[in-house]
Image (cartoon, rainbow, N blue to C red):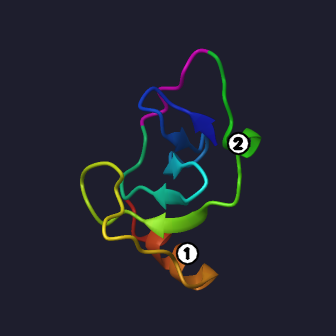
Amino acid sequence: MRLNQWDFYESEETRLQICVLTGTQAVILNFRGEGKFRSTPNYADDIESGERLSPQNTGKAPFNSPTEVFGSGEAVEKYIASIK
């Protein structure tokens, strides 16, 4: 995933976006990106530090309040499948 112009990490292939709250959460956003990346590429795997995956449950930063985390891989897959 590559850093886009809104400071979210975005999949270049699927446009899935993640907002990384360093050291705590990686919130999978419920809307796709537009492929507008920063001119200097930065990738999410360069900074990974044990964040827990969370769903977006609010429309404003930090996008996950109250704090929720996914309980299983199946829950992550179901959530991602619901994102248009």
Q: Which mark is residue 77?
A: 1
Q: Is residue 15 left or right of residue 58?
A: right
Q: Is residue 41 left or right of residue 83?
A: right
The structure residue drawn at horizontal position 34% and vertical position 56%, both measured from the top left corner, is 63
The crowd level at tag 2 (other Cα within 10 Å; few <14, some 14-19, many 20+) is: few
Three-letter code, disc 2: Ile
Q: Earlier in the sequence, mark 1 or mark 2?
A: 2
The span shown in magenta is: 34-39
Q: Is 84 a magenta residue?
A: no
- The mark lying in front, picked from 1 and 2, is 2
The structure residue drawn at horizontal position 41% and vertical position 48%, both measured from the top left corner, is 32
Q: Which mark is residue 19?
A: none
Three-letter code, disc 1: Glu
Judged from this view, the residue extending furthest toward the right is: 46
Task: Please state the horizontal and vertical placement of residue 48, each as a whole percent of the image.
Answer: 71, 50
Q: Is residue 59 above or below residue 55?
A: above
Residue 44, picture quadrant: top right
Q: Is residue 47 above or below residue 52?
A: above
CA separation in Å, label 1 and label 2: 23 Å
Q: Is residue 49 left or right of residue 3?
A: right
Cβ atoms under marks 1 and 2 closer than 8 Å: no
Q: Is 38 a magenta residue?
A: yes
- On the rendered image, what quadrant is the C terminus found in? bottom left
Tell me the residue that label 2 is attached to: 47
Instruction: Say which of 82 and 69 sits in front.
Output: 69
Residue 45, picture quadrant: top right
Per the picture, the main secondary structure of the magenta-coloured stretch is loop
The structure residue drawn at horizontal position 68% and vertical position 36%, both measured from the top left corner, is 43
The residue tagged with tag 1: helix, strand or loop?
helix
Task: Please state the horizontal and vertical placement of residue 65, each as a whole percent of the image.
Answer: 31, 65
Task: Please state the horizontal and vertical placement of residue 18, each as a whole percent of the image.
Answer: 51, 51
Task: Please state the horizontal and vertical placement of residue 77, each as a whole percent of the image.
Answer: 55, 75
